[in-house]
Image (cartoon, helix red, strand yellow):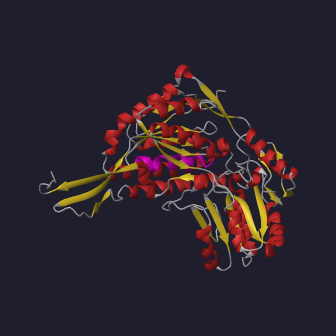
Amino acid sequence: MSTTPTYKYYAGGKWLEAQDAQTFEVLEPYSRQPFARVAAGGRPEARVAVQAAAEAFPAWSSTPPAERARLFLKAAEIVKRRRSEIANALARETGSTISFANFQQDLVAATLEQAAGWMYQPAGQVLATNQPGAHSIAVRRPLGVVASFTPWNGANILSWRAVISPIGAGNTVVVKPSELAPVSAGLMLAEIAHEAGFPEGVINVVSHAPGAAGEIADEFFDNPDVRVINLIGGVKTARMLAERAGRTLKRTVLELGGYNPMIVLDDVDLDYAVRTATFGSFFHQGQICLNTRHIIVQRKIYDEFVTRFVARTRTLTKGDPQNPATIIGPLVTPAAVKLVDDRIKEAVAKGAVVRTGGRHEGQVYEPTILTDVPADALVAQEETFGPVVVVEAVDTPEEAVAAANRTMYGLSSSILAGDTYRAFELAPKIQCGIVNVNTATVNDEIHAPMGGVRDSGWGRTGPDSLADFSDVIWINSRSAQTPYPF
């Protein structure tokens, strides 16, 4: 136990013990050995953090853009310096392969560097007016305290994404990281923010033990200083949060999951299509909201595509995520393994065929390809967060679009075709926030407005996201007295 590091929670620029010094243990997904002991915060700790954020808001909201940009760039430098250390922590705490962990660090640093420039985005606009002698402007103003719920998958990049836009817009933030990865999804971010010199209370992180998220959420909803609930997570949680937010008229920004389709047209380069399908389906062992869940192939090439896809999938190296050669690491918990296994078994019982995979060793689940999956199987309807993908044959592009739109999710999608213009004609018909032509569903650019529609949430990333965390104030001034009708 003495070799297991202990983390406190972070509020008002200080590292604090939870009430009665309570902690909980975080286990490594692959080895099931202790990774860290972490402060088990609850409602009192959340209240302390919200108060710190509220007290910091007036000064931070008026901080000049040059100073905000300087802090972002300083944080980027620290991320680069600690790249290997953070990547190793991600591999141990979340089961991320080293390659994905390093990718996250590079993306975090690049996002911080680009976001420094967002500080100089126009703060408003001059409006036309029909009123003589009037000057009309619209000004963006920050909202106050943002409560950000951060997930365990892609823990490092997504925790920073949940912080950068809110504080970039002039708000202060309290982060509630997932209990499955509290260090990578929040506490490590706090370390970097502290070292970079962010003012006390601008960024706060409250960790909690399994099953204790509710009382922290209660404080966020009941505390009038919290003005925005910012969730990166699942649809079920989002429904509960959005319902509660509606009662107190708190704004919500929701980045949720997706049942992301990939359409493969019959003029495609098959080798490229198979490589794209393999990456999109099994990157981070299917535990990314952008992973391909449903591959829709024109019947003319369906059999050949499936044969090649199965063959390539069987070459993927499985095992220890700290081994640089590993492509398929462990799922995050035994419960995650059971969910994937149950979904596959249910589909098979209803007539689905397992072309490869369907087994696991410990928490490492073999990448699995299913065909002939009936529409009423859960794996054909809901996001299954693991290395399993459904492949379906259709006759026409129009049928492919209908199949892609079959669920109520709408995050990312992909169309692969030899004729790019043919794919572009189909792209607007897919009900997703992202349509990738001739690349994978797992695709992101820092400055792009990434986000979902329908059950995949609302709000966007990139500089457009500053609007999600600010209000527009209309200022109308007159240089002469206004004539009134009475």
Q: Residue furthest top?
A: 20
Residue 290 lies in quadrant: bottom right
Q: Is residue 6 visible?
A: no
- The image position of residue 214, as x and y in percent, is 58, 31
- In this rendering, position of residue 283 left or right of residue 84: right
Looking at the image, residue 61 lies above or below residue 200? below
- The image position of residue 230, as x and y in percent, is 50, 44
- The image position of residue 247, as x and y in percent, is 48, 37
- The image position of residue 404, as x and y in percent, is 68, 63
Task: Determine the residue positioned at 32% across, 56% down.
Answer: 123
- In this rendering, position of residue 111 left or right of residue 392: left
In terms of depth relative to the viewer, which is nearer, 411 or 164? 411
Task: Determine the residue positioned at 55% across, 22% down.
Answer: 21
Task: Determine the residue positioned at 70% across, 53% down.
Answer: 286
Q: Is residue 291 visible?
A: yes
Q: Residue furthest front?
A: 486
Which image quarter holds the N terminus? top right
Magenta residues? Answer: 152-167
Residue 386 in the magenta stretch? The answer is no
Looking at the image, residue 428 lies above or below residue 247? below
Magenta: main secondary structure equals helix
